[in-house]
Amino acid sequence: MYTELFKLCGFEPDEIKKERPRIDKAFKILGIEDEDIKRGEKRLKQYLDIELLGVRRFLGIWMRELVNLVLAREEHEKIVYSDFPMELRPLMSMMLSTDEKKAYFATPGQILNMTMGQIFDKLTPFLVAGEENGLPPGAAHCALYQTRLGAMVKGVIPFPDLSVIASYHCDQPAEAEQLLHEVYGVPVAYLDSCPDPNWGDWPKFNDYRVRYCGSQARKLFQTFEEVIGCKMTDEAKRTANKANAIFRLKFQQLVELIGHADPQPISQTSLVHAFFLNSMPTRDIAGKQEALEILCGEVEERVNQGKGVVEKGAPGVFVTATISVDPGITRMIEQAGLAIRIQIPFWLSPWVMARHPYREWADMIGVGPCLDIPHSCEAHVAINLENCKAFNVDGAIDFYPYSCREWVPTVMITKKTIERELGIPVLVLEGDCYDTRNYSAGQLRTRVETFAELLRAAKAAKAA
Amino acid sequence: MITAGVDVGAATAKTVIVADGVILSYAVMPTGDSVARAAEKVTGAALEQARLSMPDLSFIISTGYGRNGVAFAHKAVTEIICHAKGVNFLIPAARTVIDIGGQDSKVIGVREDGTVSDFVMNDKCAAGTGRFLEVMAGVLGLAIEEMGPISLTSKEPCNISSTCTIFAETEMVSLRADGRNREDIVAGIHKAVASRVVVMGRTVGYRQQVVFTGGVAKNLGVKHSLEVGIRLPILIPEEPQIVGALGAALLARRELGILR
């Protein structure tokens, strides 16, 4: 019943046959039924550039991880969880220091979002369970963490032996993991930092922030070694660093290729799977690199042929959203006739990369540069502005998650700054990257379509 | 050249039929449970008034939240664009439109040519919309039409501090228990709706002439509170509910011109 679905996810018939017992077991636990599979197939065809092999290969990585996640307890001795915004390199270093049989590593919130959310549109039961078990509704808890907690308490995914979490981005991961520790007895290791820069510090970091974060990373590795019983190896750190750098660089090239092409060659929804592998540890390093190489080749071919998903000459926009659960929002923007040149944080300007001082602490702990750790609200605004300039967009759309501590304070500052500095309009949309219940797509459509009309009129006037 | 605009909103469906820049007829009726059915019925009613039939319409534009569910429309355009166009036709000096409908509220900046210069719209929360007023009227046992005239007799409007429909309802019950009179409570409700819209619209800015449209524009109490909030006089078209549909019908004329 799921053969077609798995084919759409890049599986070969032999693999489907071989994996059938595991898939059957995992799907039974997940409660995936025929109607879910049909819905999944429909959504993949509706929202993604599913005809591209690269896209299918990336989907396959996420589907394999879904099955691995559900069966992790019976297939591995130890389980380590993390989730966004944990930096990938320390995570991968820990993972590669262990034997595959010994330890399973995952970011379950992301896996569930990309599969149960994006493909099957069946995330709500997990969210509700998370709300009922310690992360209540109406308290602005992050839906990513509600999802993973809900899946654990429902018995769909196992509780981990260790949870590794970052508390430098916002308080929500630390708060949710504290609950996991206090109520369910899961050991938790934090990668802490002190996010308190002054306005005007950007792009510099205070040295104490770098040193503190470095020391916290060492502590994190020690906890990992104690709880999981594995020694961190330099070889693992080097491999993680190298694999990450190669993937990231290629991904960056792909993003730039799409952002500068006219017409926009593929939907930005088709990039989300690759993007989130920048923070999800998978042992299939070769597989994800190969998928990216294939996708790059396919996109290049489309660019050369002048094929696109949005009309040539369409107004270009910068969109501050990476929506993993609901591909309909991104597609809605494209269907309104806007070419999405770039989505933060798909791309960081070379200016940001060259000056990012977290390289320093990263060098200290030997795991390489951590370019995606946010510096401050000021940095967030500056990076948004840089993105708009670099891709010469006609407007920007700030789709911000209601409950995101990091995002919310910058929304109006970003709008005012871009409008003042670049003279282009910014549309603010309230939403949620992880929970479709927190917005009304129809209501957003009215605003997006009107904004598209404004940008078309402005572009036509400029041309005249 | 006869064109029609069909505006299917959350609460009501409206159709306006226009011929050579003149309104021939219009109809308004509740949307009910089916967008398609409401659109057909309201357009049928407008056609009947004008003694026309569907083939007489050269171009039809649908608008409103149900715009994509109107199968017989040639094109769908957002209500923001249609309201700007409709207001510009009725009051050419208008530069700002405050539109409060059944489930949303908008502040729209309008250029001289009737195009949108900027806009802001509420999020999915019902506060600051017609739905908010309906719920409050229900709690007070009033018909929605009674609220405006009652509030204008208030001498000391209550402060409804919560902008959330659910919390405001609780607050109203408390005010009633405290013995506050009905007109002050209703005026307080209007103030709460207006203050939410006034603050929201500041990012667009209020420039004269300010025009109030949508079903809630029939409530003079809200109009008064908005005027106090923005410190500018507000005009209301004779039939504020049909402005979106009118704009759609006018845009249909333009569309036809382009097609030709």
Image (cartoon, coloured by chain):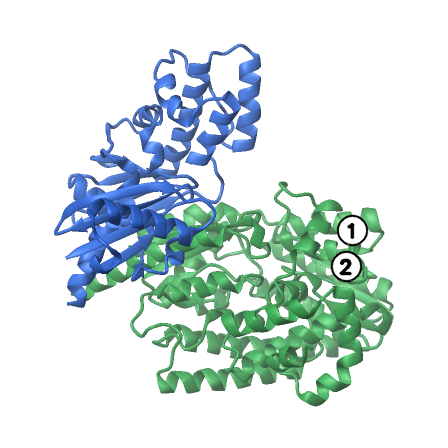
Chain colours: A green, B blue
Decide: marks 1, 2 in contact (CB < 8 A)? yes
Viewed as shown, does residue A258 lie left or right of A367?
A: left
Q: Residue placed at 62% from the left, 79% from the top?
A: A9
- Residue A397: x and y in percent read 41, 57
Q: Quadrant of the C terminus of chain B?
A: bottom left
Residue B217, position in %: x, y?
Answer: 32, 32
The residue singled out by tag 2 in the image is A163
Comparing A130 with A102, the one in front is A130
Report the chain holding disc 1: A
Can residue A390 be seen here? The reply is yes
> How far is disc 1 from disc 2 in space, using C-alphas?
9 Å
Label 1 secondary element: helix
Q: Which mark is residue A180?
A: 1
Q: Is residue A368 above or below residue B27?
A: below
Q: Are marks 1 and 2 on the same chain?
A: yes
Dot 1 amino acid type? Leu
The residue furthest bottom is: A14
